[in-house]
Image (tube, rainbow, N blue to C red):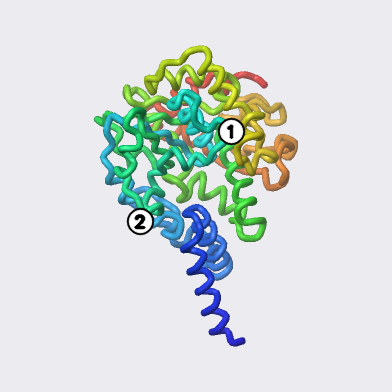
Amino acid sequence: MTGTTVCAITVALLSVAMMVLSPYERYLLKCWAFYPIYKFVIGGFHKFDQNINGYFYLNPLVNPPERIAAARAYEPDSDDLFFTAYPKSGTHALGFMMVHLLSGGKQCTTGCDLREFVTAAEFAADHGMDLDDARDAYATVPRLIGTHMPAHHMRVVGSEARYLVIVRDPVAVLQSLRTMHFFLFGPVLRQSLDEFVALHTDGSERDTGWADHVHGWWRLRALPNVRIIFYEDLVAEPEQTVRTVAEFVGRELDAGLLDIVTERMSKDWTIRHCDVTTEASTPFSPPAAFRKEIGSASTFIVNSTKFFSVKGADRFSLAQESIIRSSAWAKMLALDAGGGTDGADFIKNRPYYFKNP
């Protein structure tokens, strides 16, 4: 069998697969098919990253520019409820919470695919739909739209839509994302550790990294249609977090519904009813600043040159790979060093980050 024949058969099989697979399965297939070329031929995943109006997005294979353009062009109205975060910050947990709240606990009673209830802004085009298409299906409740887009690329100021933002300790974010990449691509195809860290701190993943992405939303925190919650609060104080979210989305919350939503946000319920592929490696647990191996949280933030020690990574399956170095928190503090205080306010408003473990 000649090389040409092999290529032709491969292309034919891929074409058939693309027609029968779901959008998410097609995305994975593209990754598995093209990532070896990116890594071993081109020399890195970042070579074709694209700059869209001053903000970086992953290459067109992952984020086709026309898809981003369609999401950015959408004009939200008062029926829209966005939930947004940097990847692996608890976006899906927040989405499930709102599905339970808005349905009065009648949806996802035994588990479900979040994509059945939520429109993903960046991926709507993959489903052959416009963001306006689903409006009739959400006639009596706010329409849920999930996104990882930066605040700068969304029409937040002056909008009647509501934006619920969840923020998570960057240490846990990076490790959770690193673990997800292991499950998706394996140890060979995923990025090198150095490339991964660079992309998510000073590189081209989601608005030049965690710090810039979070800071973009933090600067809008005073707007009445923006509410920021913290993943650590969701884990430590689930009932209070549910109350906060319910008040923001305008949902009446009686004791029965509070109990239902709180139960379904628990780790045990999620494991029993949802597809959680990374649970074994990234369980719900205190953020990195709580762990004694790192030292006091204030020292951790001020120095912020070493996010993990080997001992501090014992809850992850790949301990050595958990030694991630970054300047994300320091960068957050320095963003407004020219005169503003937003970065410092972000830290000061989270008092537990300054408590000794």
Looking at the rendered structure, the secondary structure element under dot 2 is helix
Percent across and percent down for residue 26 are: 50, 58
- The quadrant holding residue 302 is top right
238 versus 187 height, above or below: above
35 versus 337 height, above or below: below
The total number of labels drawn is 2
Task: Please indicate whether residue 125 sits to the left or right of residue 104 in the image.
Answer: left
Disc 2 marks which amino acid?
Pro
10 Å neighbourhood of mark 1: few (<14), some, or many (≥20)? Answer: few
Disc 1 marks which amino acid?
Thr
Quadrant where the C terminus lies?
A: top right
296 versus 275 height, above or below: above
Q: Nearer the viewer, residue 19 or 174?
A: 19
Which callout, 2 or 1, points at the residue further toward the start of the chain?
2
- At x 30%, y 33%, the residue is 156
10 Å neighbourhood of mark 2: few (<14), some, or many (≥20)? Answer: some
Q: Residue furthest top?
A: 255
Quadrant where the N terminus lies?
A: bottom right
Residue 23 seen in the figure:
yes
- The quadrant holding residue 60 is bottom left
Task: Please indicate whether residue 302 sits to the left or right of residue 166 in the image.
Answer: right
Residue that carries the numbered disc 1 in the rendered image: 110
CA gap, disc 2 to disc 1?
A: 37 Å
Residue that carries the numbered disc 2 in the rendered image: 65
Residues marked 2 and 1 touching at CB (< 8 Å): no
